Amino acid sequence: MKAPRKFRVLAGGGDKPADRRARDEDAGEVDELLRLAVQVGGVGIYQTDLECDRTRFSPELCRILGLPVGTEMTFAQASRLFDERDQATVRTSVETASRSADRGKWRGVHRVVRGDGTVRWVSVHGRRIYRDTPDGPKPVRSIGTVIDITHLKETEDALHENERRLRLALDAAQMGTFEADLSGAQAVIDAQEARLLGLPEETRVVSAEELRKRVPFEDLEASDAKQKRLTEGGEPYHHEFRF
């Protein structure tokens, strides 16, 4: 009677089902967090297959551009979404990026025209992906993110307009402005203040010692006493003196 054969089973390095499930769950959680971050942050994503000449937009980007979700178009059509005033700048940025150290990466702040005709400001971070060929690098894909920053631009423009109006008011009233650090050792002045002080108009920094020499002693003594009381109490400082 023959002895029973013995078999040895060699277990490979494969993962246990539980490990695979845990990894899949982790990957799914990361994908969900990324999706939520994109939605909450209002980040639009585009990708262009340059060989097939098709550009696809994420739902968030469709909302930014005022397009139906799922919209696809050619690369030329997508390029025309930029305001005519910015199209040349965008083309230059993309072409310049192809010759930079970070080949293909580009970014910019540009205007886009939504589907309803309104103009929005967007911040774009893009990248072209190239494939090496005997004739040199050939662009095959383009990907990037888009964020609507219209509210930031409007705030910035409003601040600039307020600054312009303030400057007009200061010039009309012959008022200058200065800014000094806590040490009071020196002050930064504007052109109007320089003119009032009899300094060259381009002067921007003056020492406190130089300014104090121009004030009569009795006015300076009264000014110092008042300034000390007000600054210790955290109040605005106001005083009149001869110069």
Image (tube, rainbow, N blue to C red):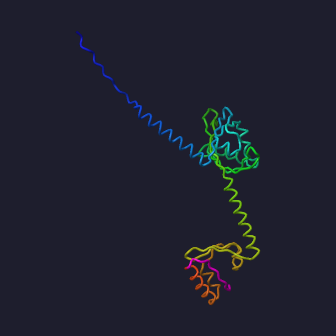
* Residue at figure coordinates x 38%, y 30% from the top left: 13
Please state the extent of the stretch shown in magenta in the rendering.
Answer: 233-243
- Residue 195 highlighted magenta (yes or no): no
Residue extending farthest to the bottom is 218
* Location of residue 194 (image quadrant): bottom right
User: In this picture, is 157 found above or below 200?
Assistant: above
Q: Is residue 40 left or right of residue 85?
A: left
Any part of residue 218 in sight? yes
* Residue at figure coordinates x 60%, y 84% from the top left: 226
- Residue 234 highlighted magenta (yes or no): yes
Residue 109 or residue 136, whichever sits in front: 109
Residue 130 in picture, x, y percent from top left: 61, 37
Residue 46 in picture, x, y percent from top left: 64, 41
* Residue at figure coordinates x 44%, y 34% from the top left: 21
User: In this picture, is 20 found above or below 107?
Assistant: above
* Residue at figure coordinates x 61%, y 75% from the top left: 187
Residue 159 in picture, x, y percent from top left: 69, 63
